[in-house]
Every structure is written in structure tokens, then in C-alpha cells.
Image: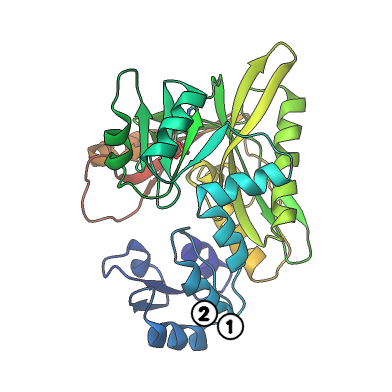
Amino acid sequence: MLACAGARLGLKTHVFAPEADSPAFDVCAARTIAAYDDEQALAAFAAAVDVVTYEFENVPARTAALLAGLRPVRPSPAALAATQDRLVEKELLAELGIATAPYMRVDDAGAMARAVAQFGRPSILKTRRFGYDGKGQALVREGADLAVTFRSLGGGPAILEAVVPFSREVSVVAARGIDGAFAAYDVCENRHENHILKLTTAPARIAPQTAERAVGLARRIAEALDYVGVLAVEMFVVETAAGEELRVNEIAPRVHNSGHWTLDGALTSQFEQHMRAVAGWPLGATDRRGREVEMENLIGEEALAYDAVLREKGACLHLYGKAQARPGRKMGHVTRIRD
Ligand code: AMP
């Protein structure tokens, strides 16, 4: 989608990916299939492009650093490093005075037992790295054996989080330009099924002051990281006696699934916005089209029913061209704009 947005602006995209069947290869001007640690391939890739970006936070930090020695990498390798490790990310948020779920570092079964004693059950164990769509997470239930739970996630570096009693999950998708300009989309609301995002609606049904605070948090994070490009900040909304409060759950240093509604539902899509930002161009307007926009993910075999979506008036179908509709895999999405 970044490549498509770039092409419309006359930008040619060269995709570097380790998988030979990357769907982006269908729509880009040039391709490199190589491992992230193939230094020769990375150098040849850098020589062929003007600027490097990424749409996946698990690109190794060393890969980003190596490329940054050859070409501008936006967002910076430092922003990538700060957001690809849940502990480093939480520490950054703590430094900024931004509330998160209470958490503790868990490096071994002993630390796990101490953390569970602190937060009680249920609590949530998360690997520090490589987690997505609920992978790399385990709920610590009543009666569960702690050592077994710890090992079930591979026994590597992790954190334990207290469960946040949220009323809603929202996210801010925003962009920061090379000149420090900042533009956020409407705060949107996210509903997950089986730990996978199912439905996003914009705007979120939260108080206007809460939405303003949410955007303010995203802006502070973007500024602290000297960020260039689109980022997403996922937050929990908690109802307290004092009103709605926000806890930041996760920062994604990239275009984000909860921003897919902008493809049809905003004046500038998050993908065009990201391409503008990394190209050093002015950011586009983020206004929403319509009264409400909904984005529904097509997960696994749901995507096989695309025919019904095509027959639905006004529904915008996006299929990603992934070869196999495996269970839990995001195969496409539908956006609906409500007037
Ligand atoms: P994550 O991979 O951290 O985005 O977590 C995936 C989903 O698990 C979130 O969107 C929430 O629905 C749920 N979740 C994660 N952490 C917590 C928490 N500390 N308290 C309550 N729910 C959580």
C-alpha cells in the first residue's frame, strides 16, 4: 500500500524482503529478496534508493543501523530500537511521564513468581520482542504453573503486565514531518477478536477532551523520538471517578492496521502520509470523510466471501494478494463510510 501510494505520486518503490512471495512485490518497481543480515544485498539496495523506510518493526536494529550509514533511514533506527522491545518502550513512556499498564521485567522463572505476587492473577506475560496479534503473550490464570507459563513463551526476556480494566481500546495514528510538522487522524476505536484486530471505527466514542489528550500523548512520543513518518499509539481507556483516563499499550513505528480506514475514509491515507513524510514533503490533510468510517478486517477464510463485499454498495474492498488464507491471517479489509 505504501508502494501504491508512492506510485500515485510518481515515486518508485524498491522493496527489500526476505520472503520470495511478499505481496508488495506485485506492486513495486524493483525488488530484492535477501536476508536482513545480508550485508552485500543491503549495500546494493541502499545504492539503488534515495531514502529507506520500513513497515515492520521486527527489522533487526543492526540492519537499520547499517542502512543508516548509507542512506537516510526514516523513522530513525533509534525510533525502531525504542519500539521493538516492550521493556525499552515502557521505560521511554515512564521517562515521558505517560501512564501504561503496571509492568515488571521478567528474565527468569524467579522474577516471574515475584511479578505475579505483585500483580496477582490474571496478569499478562508478554515477550519483549517479536509479539503481534496476541502471539508472544500468555494470560497467567488462577492455578496456572508459573514456570510452565514462562517456558510456554520460550523462556526468553519478557515483561509481566497487570490487567488494565479498560472500557475501550483506541489508537492515534499520526505523522511527523522532517520539519517537525505534526498531523493526527481522528482517534479511532478498536475491537479485537481472538487478540486480532477485527473492527476499527473512527471517530472513537470518547469525550472530546480525552481525544485531545490522546493526540497530545502521541505528539509527545513522536517529538521525543524525533520521529519522521507515520506512527500509531495504542491506548486503553479506563473509566475512573475523575472521568476517562488513558494508558498507552503499544507504539508502532509504522503505518498501522487501525489506520487502514484512512485509505478511503480520510483526505490523505496513512500510506500517502508516510510516503510524504519520509520523502521530506509536506504532510497532507487528515480530515475524515463522512460522519463515521468503519474498517473491518477479513481474517483467514472470511476473505473468500469477497464476492458479497463487491456487491455491497459503497463498501471498499482491499485484498492483499496473500497466497494462502490461513486461520488468523489478515487477508484484506473492507472500509465503509457512513454519511
Ligand atoms: P498487544 O499485543 O500488547 O497490543 O496486546 C493485544 C491485546 O491484548 C490488546 O489489544 C488488549 O486487547 C489485550 N491486552 C494487552 N495488554 C493488556 C493489559 N495489560 N490489560 C488488558 N488487556 C491487555
Circle 1 sits on which residue?
Answer: 69
Q: Is residue 91 above or below residue 168?
A: below
Does residue 264 appear left or right of residue 243 in this picture?
Answer: left
Residue 75 seen in this snapshot = no
**Which of 300/116 is in front?**
116
Residue at point 43% right, 46% down?
Answer: 107
Residue hosting label 2: 66
* C-alpha separation, residue under disc 1 versus residue under disc 2: 5 Å
Q: Quadrant of residue 99?
A: top right
Q: Residues within 10 Å of mark 2 (few under 14, many from 20)?
A: some
User: x and y percent of residue 325 in the render?
Assistant: 22, 46
Q: Nearer the viewer, residue 261 or 114?
A: 114
- Tag 2: residue type? Leu
Percent across and percent down for residue 95 are 71, 46
On the question of residue 101 being in view, the answer is yes
Question: In the image, is the residue at mark 1 within 8 Å of ligand 1 by its beta carbon?
Answer: no
Image coordinates of residue 189 in percent, x first then y, are 56, 30
**Residue at x-position 50% and y-position 65%:** 54
Left or right of residue 206, residue 18 in this image: left
Marks 1 and 2 in Cβ contact (< 8 Å): yes
Q: Which corner quadrant of the image does residue 44 belong to? A: bottom left
Image coordinates of residue 1 in percent, x first then y, are 46, 59
| Residue occupying the point 54% across, 24% down | 164
At mark 1, the secondary structure is loop
Q: Secondary structure at mark 2?
A: helix
Frontmost residue, 272 versus 325 = 325
